[in-house]
Image (cartoon, coloured by chain):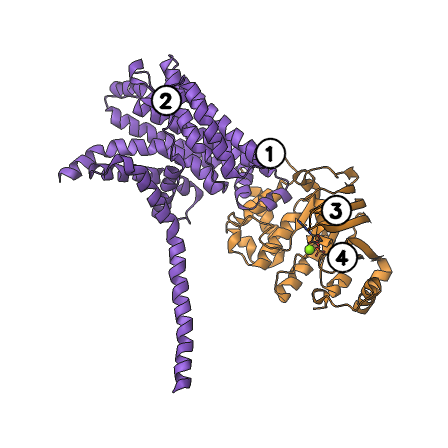
Chain colours: A purple, B orange
Amino acid sequence: MELLASILKNLPDAVSLGLVWGIMAIGVYITFKVLDIADMTVDGTFAMGGCIVASTVASGWNPIFSTLFAILCGMAAGLVTGILHTKLKIPAILAGILTMLSLYSVDLMILGGKSNIGMSQFGENRVYTILDKLAAALGTTAKTTNIITGIVLAVVIVMGLYWFFGTEQGCLIRATGINEAMVKAQGGNTDTMKIIGLIIANGFVSLSGALVSQIQRYGDVGMGTGTIVIGLASIIIGEVIFGTKCSFKVRLASVFFGSIIYRVIIAIVLLLGFNPNNLKLLTAVLVIAALSVPVIRGYIFERKRIRANMKKYEEVETDAGA
Amino acid sequence: MLVLKDVCKTFNRGSANEKVALQGIDLTVKEGDFITVIGGNGAGKSTMLNMISGAFPVDSGLVKIGGENVTNQPEHVRAKRIGRVFQDPMKGTAGDMWIEENLAIAMRRGKRRSLRWGVTKDERELYKKLLAPFDLGLEDRLQTKVSLLSGGQRQALTLLMATVQKPDILLLDEHTAALDPKTAAKVLAMTDELIKEHNLTAIMVTHNMKDAIKYGNRLIMMMNGKIIYDVSGEEKAALEVSDLLKKFEVSTGEEFANDRMLLV
Ligand SMILES: Nc1ncnc2c1ncn2[C@@H]1O[C@H](COP(=O)(O)OP(=O)(O)O)[C@@H](O)[C@H]1O
Ligand SMILES: [Mg+2]
């Protein structure tokens, strides 16, 4: 009972955190699901978004400008991976890892050689303080405004992406992830399509990192570790709930729902006394389990088929023996 | 409409798997020509089409389409002049997208892709009209994913996609080979109709000699990366399968033994 109460108490935070991390998961969705590329850049981009905001806000920037700047830098990171992959023909995974690795050094530079910067010491200069003031003016709580802002942002992103991927340009990007030969035969430049997709995806990931660092009140060079896996976990949870057959709009929204549920699961697990150090392991196991379900189902099916087939012949043999 | 001048292509040059695919192809295709291409496995038929479409660059030689030198143009740039249907029915369409989305992408071949909506209402009506004559019921399934269609239906759709923007040249690479005989015959008849209706210039690779004789106004036989026989007009119309077999034996100096080229 006490547990339930504390879960309920933590729910609003888990939801607003889930919405913000969901923006990152949407980025992973664009590369992993739409473009069919496992883009490792996101681990670096997420941390970069956080570090840029921490350092620029610390030096007195308007937090909204900082956040927009972080988005631009994230897009640039996507561009770099895109060029490495398409123009220099480096396999997508390696291209992403190379950019991610480089970004680690870039992050250290951004933070002026330190591995993290706390924002608390620089006053209440965050996007969220603006929201807090808004909440006070409207007479609601900060928690409510955070959730409402998160929902508004999520809806805008889902509608925006639904629109974009329905345009002539967007259709071609989707087709690139499905059948490159077809796109080329229809006059589409698949390299450009991949680069555009990577730019957009990493812009979202960086935005997510920028917002998360403002919630946590610090930016850390290590805050991106395992980002892609968390993104995949959110996508998978969304798929488990909504299935894979629904419309594109619903699939995009399901990523946000997946991200929220992931945060709720984490919150519950922590309340149950789970060691936070093991969270990444738990997330990885979750993704492995989800990815292996269809494979294991296939094994079981295959075993049944083999056994049924062999059984037929056993009977024939015993008949002959008798 | 199309000119190939001394086009050569060798794969994996200098390695143990070096494969000479084309050795000096000269070919001039007039507007409205419908050429059928036959030849044994590995004769270079597909490679010739790939040189035209730009899927691989030529080693040497010249490719001109519609008067423009496209030899060094990347595949997606010269695609505005070319319609293509592949042997693999999966290759010409995006399976995880709707029929109308596939058609809309093809409709914009050679045009700039903007941020306008990908499929318009007017287009939808047009697609219905274009699909109806195929008699496959696709006109009522515009918002069905292509992956749910049969191989024959996908190939019919690819055919429409290749021609919905009139191409300077239509390239068909054994596009009925993966289909069952009945469907293959149907798709082939559709192909012929489309080519006649829009007065298209086309090159069709086939391993069926009867079809090669039945369709088109010109026939080319390839062997070892060369064109060894080229007939058109009256002479082509009067061809018999036995003539082609004889021609083949004379060129190789051996009995015709390639089962893939046997008549179906
Ligand atoms: N992408 C490729 N890489 C290496 N060798 C190839 C490639 N494409 C074709 N070849 C080789 O070139 C020769 C001609 O092939 P192809 O044009 O496909 O013949 P056809 O279509 O007449 O059967 C064959 O020996 C084939 O093995
Ligand atoms: Mg071939």
Pointers 4 and 2 within a single chain: no
Residue picked out by circle 4: B36
- Separation of residues labelled 4 and 2 (CA atoms): 68 Å
Instruction: Give how far across and how far down residue A118 sits, in percent.
Output: 32, 19
Q: Amino acid at mark 4?
A: Thr
Q: Are marks 4 and 3 in contact (CB under 8 Å)?
A: no
Residue picked out by circle 2: A115
Q: Are marks 4 and 1 in contact (CB under 8 Å)?
A: no
Residue picked out by circle 1: A87
Subunit of label 1: A
Instruction: Give how far across and how far down residue A216 sits, in percent.
Output: 30, 25
Rendered image quadrant of residue A185: top right
Tag 4 secondary structure? strand
Q: Residue at x 53, y 56 (%)?
A: B149
Frontmost of labels 4 and 3 is: 3
Instruction: Give how far across and how far down residue A5 sits, in percent.
Output: 16, 36
Q: Is mark 3 within 8 Å of ligand 1?
A: yes
